Image (spheres, coloured by chain):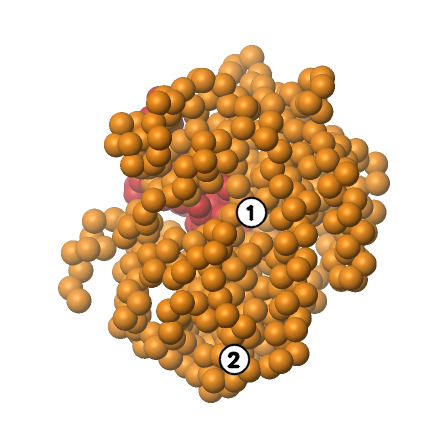
Chain colours: A red, B orange
Amino acid sequence: MPEAFPVTINGATCLVAQGTTVAAAMLLVEQPSRISVTGEQRAALCGMGICFECSAVVNGTSHRRTCQILCERNMTVETDR
Amino acid sequence: MTRAEVLVIGAGPAGIAAATAASENGSKVVVLDDNAAPGGQIWRSATVEENNSPKRRSKDTKRRALERLRRSGAQVLSSRCVFTVEASGTLQTLHEAASASLVEKFHFEKLILATGARERFLPFPGWTLPGVFGAGGLQALVKGGYPVAGKRVVVAGTGPLLLAVAAHLTEDGAIISSVVEQAALARLAPFAASLWAHPAKLLQGARYRSKLWKTPYRTGCWVVEAVAGRAGQRLKAVRITDGARIWTEPCDLLACGYHLVPNTEIATLLGCAFRDGFVQVDQAQRTSLPNVFCAGELTGIAGLEAAMVQGEIAGLACTGRTDASLQKGAEAERIFSERMEKAFALRTELRSLPQPETIVCRCEDVTFASLRGYTGWTDAKLQTRCGMGPCQGRICGPAVEHLLGWKPVSVRQPLFPVPLQAFLLPE
């Protein structure tokens, strides 16, 4: 098995395998990446950095395209609201 | 400021071939790519290797291409998003790392655009629900570590990508309930027959079919609605039609994409001439600008082989070389591309998929009803904010073009949203 390490998504810590994108990790724990301007839950759509639906708060910075970012140990990720 | 004799944007098959050819012939080459690793979408690496089926064949063409690129000495810079570019020879990228974003400047003598394509999305009721993905989109996310083992997936839309995605998801343990292709069998049959002239593509098609022998391939059918479960937040089924009747298919995930559209933003901003929506190039892959070349899906959706041939031609052309046999190969691929466009042309019924309350612009939640009464982008943008969100119309643009016939009006810098600091840094 590849090395696994903890990341915190919306306050809950989970283990992800090395090489997991942040978008995949959010899908894994069924957390929306962002809340749309009218309040809908949204998750990744295009998977390749085009659509911005997977934008979330990564280590305190909002609007990050999570499908283009790999998880790192102890990273914190939150739904972009 | 990094200086390159040849700067390549995009590290998919076209960009890799271009960079390799230019570098092997003595140019100082830099390749910029938005993704975390070279390979583009078709050669996107599974980043979580061990999670994948050990049966997965290593892709020899990809491995050879990447190895040759490495040996050529071309410098590949990943996770770089180009946000400004000037034909005079400078561009800026945002280097996106997990914890910080850095702005970098590049100077080029010659530029090769190999920015590839994205999926075309068409709005239908429920398409914004979590659990609805692009077809290539879901495959990319699975390669990024999203497990789909045991999940029931409907793969829908149009284009040869659907079978490839279904085959790959099957390898990852997904249960493909059906592949739903909007093109009618009567259109697909002549296209399939024409593949005899392309043995590699025929073989690939046969491989996909053999993995999917139990999966229904429903031609002339399309998804009309994604249905949410009781909580209203997750997908539980899709409704499918053949034009005559509508039925419901329960599923956990929907992977739906309507073929591909080229990523033309940089070419448009530079002022390259276009023909039928694609960048116009000559036999040496030169655009209407003397120092800008273009290869791959930007010049016509033609797939892997075309991208590699065109990339090599462009890379050689940047170093003043030509190869007649390559150009002959490129011509054969162009004919294939035209046949493919015809076979997978979108049916008119897809224009009536959105209901008045269906969201068309996902960034700004603009509904189909609110676009009525406008005649084009300029009005609609000002009044509704359609296309004004972070994707800058990359998703709703091609959708609106199909639904309402509006052509995109302009591309502006920055090409992607960047933090304000990007503009505050010293030169």
Marks 1/2 in contact by CB < 8 Å: the verdict is no
Please give the name of the residue rendered at 38% of the width and 74% of the height, measured from the top-left corner. B290
For residue B202, which quarter of the picture?
bottom right
- Pointer 1: residues within 10 angstroms few (<14), some, or many (20+)? many
Q: Is A7 rendered above or below residue B327?
A: above
Provide the residue designation for mark 1: B260
- On the question of residue A78 being in view, the answer is no
Which residue in the rendered view is the most extreme toward the bottom? B26
In the displayed structure, does residue B201 sit left or right of residue B136?
right
Q: Mark 1: which amino acid?
A: Leu
Please give the name of the residue rendered at 68% of the width and 45% of the height, measured from the top-left corner. B343
The alpha-carbon separation of the residues under discs 1 and 2 comes to: 27 Å
Say which of B298 and B79 sits in front: B298
Q: Position of residue B185 (x, y in %)?
A: 77, 37
Q: Mark 2: which amino acid?
A: Leu
Q: Are marks 1 and 2 on the same chain?
A: yes
**Quadrant (top left/top right/bottom left/bottom right) for the N terminus of chain B:** bottom left
Provide the residue designation for mark 2: B316
**Quadrant (top left/top right/bottom left/bottom right) for the C terminus of chain B:** bottom left
In the displayed structure, does residue B18 sit left or right of residue B343?
left
> Which structural element holds mark 1?
strand
Please give the name of the residue rendered at 46% of the width and 21% of the height, measured from the top-left corner. B358
Please give the name of the residue rendered at 27% of the width and 71% of the height, measured from the top-left corner. B88
| Mark with earlier residue (1, 2) | 1
Say which of B293 and B406 sits in front: B406
Q: Position of residue B165 (x, y in %)?
A: 67, 44
Q: Position of residue B187 (x, y in %)?
A: 73, 41
Say which of B115 and B272 sits in front: B272
